[in-house]
């Protein structure tokens, strides 16, 4: 995956930033959040934008140098749009699918009711916190949509949680300059921890249901 990022993703991002600047940044962040399984991590996308800020590269659409705050604003907008797309797909397609076929993947009507009640009480905090955790920040859109979290609340807390994440990663790109690629290494322990938490959560879910049966 790292090799694919070096050979394909980074040249693509550099081309997008050189061609459509901020708009390219927003589109890539939307894709990164809507299609979280693609190898386009924000840990690469945002620091590269920060590197453009550090070098005062001319942004092609405005004709001015890349701005930190404008880059953050477009990144937040793109991230929110992508998360809304995944949320909508989960709301429209995911809920009916699980209601009809959930028993085949150990998801019962009771599980959906529990998830609905949990998101009604804690959805705001869950989305807000999840947006600053690698991997989880994109996946949170799926249970939020399936649990029918009100769209305005999801959008609000998703955007609020995204702001510090985008600010941090763009800033790291500015500070590290030529060493912007080190951001991925800095965040890798957090990413690995997120994988462990997800794996343990899935394992606990499966164990509970299999033991009940």
Image: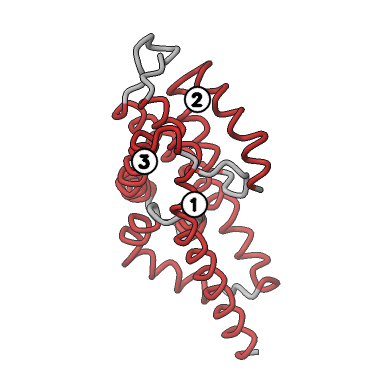
**Closer to the camera, 175 or 188?**
175
Viewer-nearest residue: 87 or 200? 200
What is the secondary structure assignment of the residue under circle 3? helix
In this picture, residue 171 sits left or right of residue 11: left
- Mark-to-mark CA distance, 3 and 1: 12 Å
Report the front residue among 104 and 181: 181
Q: Quadrant of residue 202?
A: bottom right
For disc 1, the marked residue is 185
Where is residue 152? Give x, y as percent: 34, 45
Q: Nearer the viewer, mark 2 or mark 3?
A: 3
- Image height of 179 relative to 206, above or below: above
The residue to which callout 3 is attached is: 172
Q: Look at 38% across and 22% down and name the residue there.
A: 55
Closer to the chain start, of discs 1 and 2, is: 2
Element under disc 1: helix
Q: Which residue is mark 2?
A: 24
| Few, some or many residues within 10 Å of mark 2 (<14, 14–19, 20+) | many
Residue at image coords 47%, 29%: 25
- Give the side of residue 12 with respect to residue 150, left or right: right
From the image, state whether disc 1 or disc 2 is nearer to you.
1
Gap between marks 1 and 2 measured at Cα: 24 Å
- Relative to 183, say whether 112 is above or below: below
SS class of the residue under badge 2? helix
Q: Is residue 200 above or below residue 89?
A: below
Graded by Cα atoms within 10 Å as few (under 14), some (14 to 19) or many (20 or more), the crowding at tag 1 reads few
* Label located before the other in sequence (3 or 1): 3
């Amino acid at each position: 995956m790292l090799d694919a990022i070096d050979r394909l993703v980074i040249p693509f991002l550099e081309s997008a930033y050189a061609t459509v600047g901020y708009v390219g940044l927003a589109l890539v962040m939307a894709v990164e959040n809507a299609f979280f399984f693609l190898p386009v991590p924000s840990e690469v996308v945002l620091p590269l934008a920060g590197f453009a800020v550090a070098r005062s590269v001319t942004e092609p659409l405005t004709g001015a140098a890349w701005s930190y705050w404008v880059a953050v604003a477009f990144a937040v907008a793109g991230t929110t749009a992508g998360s809304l797309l995944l949320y909508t797909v989960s709301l429209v397609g995911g809920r009916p699918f699980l209601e009809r076929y959930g028993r085949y993947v150990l998801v019962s009507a009771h599980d959906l009711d529990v998830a609905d009640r949990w998101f009604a009480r804690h959805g705001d905090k869950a989305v807000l916190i999840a947006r600053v955790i690698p991997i989880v920040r994109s996946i949170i859109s799926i249970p939020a949509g399936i649990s029918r979290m009100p769209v305005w609340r999801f959008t609000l807390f998703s955007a609020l949680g995204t702001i510090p994440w985008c600010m941090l990663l763009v800033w790291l790109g500015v500070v590290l300059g030529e060493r912007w690629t080190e951001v991925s290494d800095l965040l890798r322990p957090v990413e690995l921890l997120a994988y462990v938490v997800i794996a343990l959560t899935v394992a606990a879910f499966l164990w509970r249901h299999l033991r009940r049966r």
